[in-house]
Image: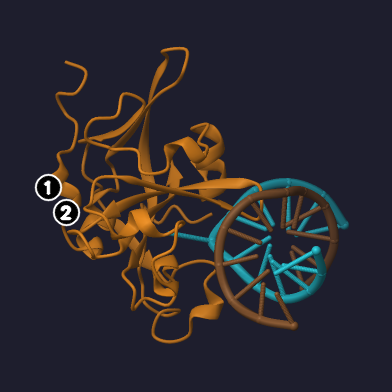
Chain colours: A orange, B cyan, C brown
Amino acid sequence: MKSENRLPADFFIRDVLEVAPELLGKMLVRQFSDGRIERYRITETEAYRGIEDRACHASKGRTPRTEVMFREGGTVYVYLIYGQYWLLNLVTGPEDDASAVLIRGIEGFSGPGRVGRELQLDRSFYAENLISSERIWVEDGEAASQITTTPRIGIHYAGEPWTSNCWRYLINASLR
DNA sequence: GTAAGGATTGGC
DNA sequence: CCAATCCTTACT
């Protein structure tokens, strides 16, 4: 019952530009340490596409931090930003395709830092397997009826065409 | 060892 | 628009 609707690995082992928009409307599920299970509808995502994408962390090479992005899709990539926020990414594509989707918003919580805070993420979630994990996974949900796209946020340093690519996806034009 | 900078947020 | 905050990375 619990995992009936859990998305399989195949969902994530595709081009990040397909996965990122399709994640809108899906349910991000978190089982906390006290056993409480919460489900959050995904409302905003961003695609980071491989080593050529200058906005993608993997463009700086395979380091201890980015290593998980090079793995097969279906795992978690978390990292600490500004020394205070854990940002949640879902790795996509086949092995050696260093792409991932940044979860920028879930229903009730707007902004990637707030998502990580609500989900109580920390470094122990690095490389967590979304297919087998007992504390975080993704379930199917009602597809988004309308999707808005814009350039990605906070990557001014990346240069063209990366700063202009509309790789940010939102439900119902729910801009913040 | 030291310094620079960041896929943010919140406040002015 | 700007500062807080502190870990990661790239140097000296």
Q: Residue furthest left?
A: A10
Q: Secondary structure at mark 1?
A: helix
Amino acid type, callout 1: Asp
Does the CB distance between marks 1 and 2 fall below 8 Å?
yes
Location of residue A77 in the rendering, given as x and y in whole percent from the top left corner: 40, 49
Give the residue at x 20% y 60%.
A18
Q: Is residue A109 left or right of residue A95?
A: right
Q: Please state, as top left, top right, bottom left or bottom right, where the C terminus of chain A lies in the image.
A: bottom right
* Residue A142 in view: yes
- Can you say whether A116 is above or below B5 in the image? above
Residue for badge 2? A13
* A77 over A135 or under it: above or below: below
Amino acid residing under circle 2: Ile
CA distance for labels 1 and 2 = 5 Å
- Residue A4 at x, y = what percent? 14, 24
Name the residue beneath numbered marker 1: A10
Task: Tell me which chain the residue with mark 1 is part of.
Answer: A
Q: Disc 2 sits on a residue from what chain?
A: A
| Residue plotted at (15% across, 48% down) | A11
- Residue B11 point in image, percent of width and height: 82, 49
Q: How dense is the environment of label 2, judged by Cα within 10 Å: few (below 14), some, or many (20 and up)?
A: some
Coordinates of residue A54 in the picture (x, y in percent): 42, 77
Disc ID at residue A137: none
- Write the residue at 44% across / 52% down: A174
Quadrant assignment, res A165: bottom left
